[in-house]
Image (cartoon, coloured by chain):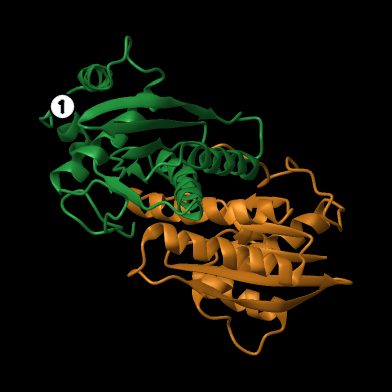
Chain colours: A orange, B green
Amino acid sequence: MRVLGIDPGTAITGYGVVEEVKGDLKSLAFGVIRTPASQPLPVRLQSIYRAVRELATEWEPAAAAVEELFFSSNVRTAMSVGQARGVALLALADAGLTVAEYTPLTVKQAVTGYGNADKAQMQEMVRLLLGLAEVPRPDDAADALAVAICHLHSARLTGLSDSSLPPHRGKGWGWESK
Amino acid sequence: MRVLGIDPGTAITGYGVVEEVKGDLKSLAFGVIRTPASQPLPVRLQSIYRAVRELATEWEPAAAAVEELFFSSNVRTAMSVGQARGVALLALADAGLTVAEYTPLTVKQAVTGYGNADKAQMQEMVRLLLGLAEVPRPDDAADALAVAICHLHSARLTGLSDSSLPPHRGKGWGWESK
């Protein structure tokens, strides 16, 4: 099973493609989509849409996973991330993919086994789980790989191994209207 | 000159098409795009994208206008509006339209002449300016008409009467990265 993880942002959107074969996790690709602040916002959103669609076409994942974000502080940041997130979700849906959303806590628990891991521990676990020589950089790419791993973990826990995952299944799932 | 105003939201997106001919304003169409909360978020975003593109195709506006939102309260709302807004901006850009963004204060000043108008005064002024028998309903449609009027007002003030408006021009303009 192959999963495309996305960590959306207007300036920088992380992505990671993770495949599970007989219990082994492998990173097929990871990186970031950057858009210059000098461009008009709609043009930046067009770039994100196109890049996400191209990733879906190139890697043919069975499903996509995105972190469900909760901001405690900056409303302006939430708005900006929301715009990029909307476009990314649209691109994934247009590519015919189901998109699973997970809370940050669920991602942490799936990757590290407990919810209090800090960012460095998370990244080191992502590195170990994927058998990489170094921690994936930048952070946005590591975060995208983490949410993809979380989806594979959830799929295994629920006994599902293909893309026939229902939209509402278990904790951390669902299409909550925000 | 014809302008498409959009007031984005995940559950309800307002739109309004306003045309100025020799100083007279006329509303050609207004209404809302509703998406049911029972649908997965990506499907709702697809509906918004398609509907906005269809409006652009049907009405062939010279430009589009969207309110630049500042939230003081709810981060979750900002995230939700951001997602719908990102998809609406993408649809307008894909339709080849330049999109102007105005602060709520600029819209108020353009419609009512001073910045302290309340919502009811704003809506009454929109009704009067467009020569409508009744205040446009729902609120989201009235808000979309107001931002379209604001754009026509700004275009007149800056001596421009076509779609060749640059992205950075005067107060309330610009592609601020959020």
- Residue B79 vs A56, above or below: the answer is above
The answer for which chain carries disc 1 is: B
- Residue B172 vs A65, above or below: the answer is above
- Give me the residue at 44% from left, 41% from top: B81
In this rendering, would B172 be left or right of A125?
Answer: left
Question: Which residue is situated farthest in the bottom direction here?
Answer: A133
- Give me the residue at 15% from left, 49% from top: B158
Q: Is residue A107 visible?
A: yes
Quarter of the rendering containing residue A124: bottom right
Place of residue A28 in the rendered image (x, y in percent of width and height, measured from the top left): 72, 78
Q: Is residue A111 visible?
A: no
Of the pair A2 and B168, the residue shown nearer to us: B168
Q: Amino acid at mark 1?
A: Thr
Residue bearing mark 1: B112
Of the pair A148 and B141, the residue shown nearer to us: B141
In this rendering, would A166 be left or right of B176?
Answer: right
Which quadrant, please, contains the C terminus of chain B? bottom left
Numbered label tally: 1
